[in-house]
Image (spheres, rainbow, N blue to C red):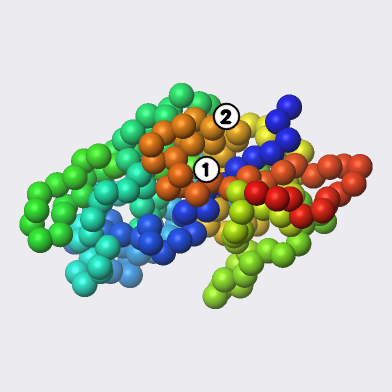
Amino acid sequence: MTEHIWYIEALLLGQYNRGYAPADDPALSERENRNIRLKILYRMRQGEPVAPEELPETYVYNKGHPGTRLDIPFWWSAFLQVREDMAEVMRRFDLGRTLLHPITVELAGGKGEDRRYLTLATSNIRSTIDPDHSEGIHYGQKRRSALMCEGKVHPRVRAFRTAVEGPAIWTDPGVADTLFVNDALAQALLAEPYGRDLRLKQVRLVDERRGLPHPAGP
């Protein structure tokens, strides 16, 4: 059995935010549209599956946002969007309760449409980070724990040994905004030309005999 899992650290970086938001239903208020999306995200984080028709079909430019170029393998705005070549790699693995739902992006400045991206919506959840054998978890502005580290291996966080069981992609309800992948999927993504852009970071499984070992090197 592999002794580690991975997470996509790039999802925590603002540089992957783009200025495209789900098109609102004109029959609803802005607040009602936002609440619908928040409820979908909440259900996913609780492990409740969502239907494809619940996800946005079209994204439109959010006027004034500087991030308009779609030249990256994934980006986030409300939901996570992955490019079709990244989605194709993911489809080789057991994704459990994960949707890859095609979207249309209406480009800024009336420059046409981009249909290369799909919304990645996963309802796979499982306890992953072992708090009894971890330390040094970074806290953001909203005091929610998130994983960040300098090297390729997180030196002060360990995962439960059961974290490797189940679908190849998942979230941990106790760790904000973090997408975990198993070793097989991580290696497949790293083999792609865009692999380094994902900033995949490794988390070792807890050693039940010793707990947290000395800080791991990259």
Q: Measuring from the top left, give residue 131's x and y in whole percent.
A: 77, 57
Q: Residue at x 50, y 49 (%)?
A: 199
Vertical side of 26 occupied by 51: above or below = above
Q: Are marks 1 and 2 in contact (CB under 8 Å)?
A: no
Which secondary structure lies at badge 2? helix
User: Quadrant of residue 103 in the image?
Assistant: top left
Quadrant in the picture for the N terminus: top right
Q: Measuring from the top left, give residue 23's x and y in whole percent.
A: 23, 57
The residue under label 2 is 184
Total of numbered circles in the picture? 2
Kind of residue indicated by mark 2? Ala
| Left or right: 124 in relation to 41 | right
- For this orientation, the residue located farthest to the top is 92
Q: Residue at x 14, y 47 (%)?
A: 113
Q: Residue at x 29, y 42 (%)?
A: 117
The residue under label 1 is 123
Which secondary structure lies at badge 1? loop
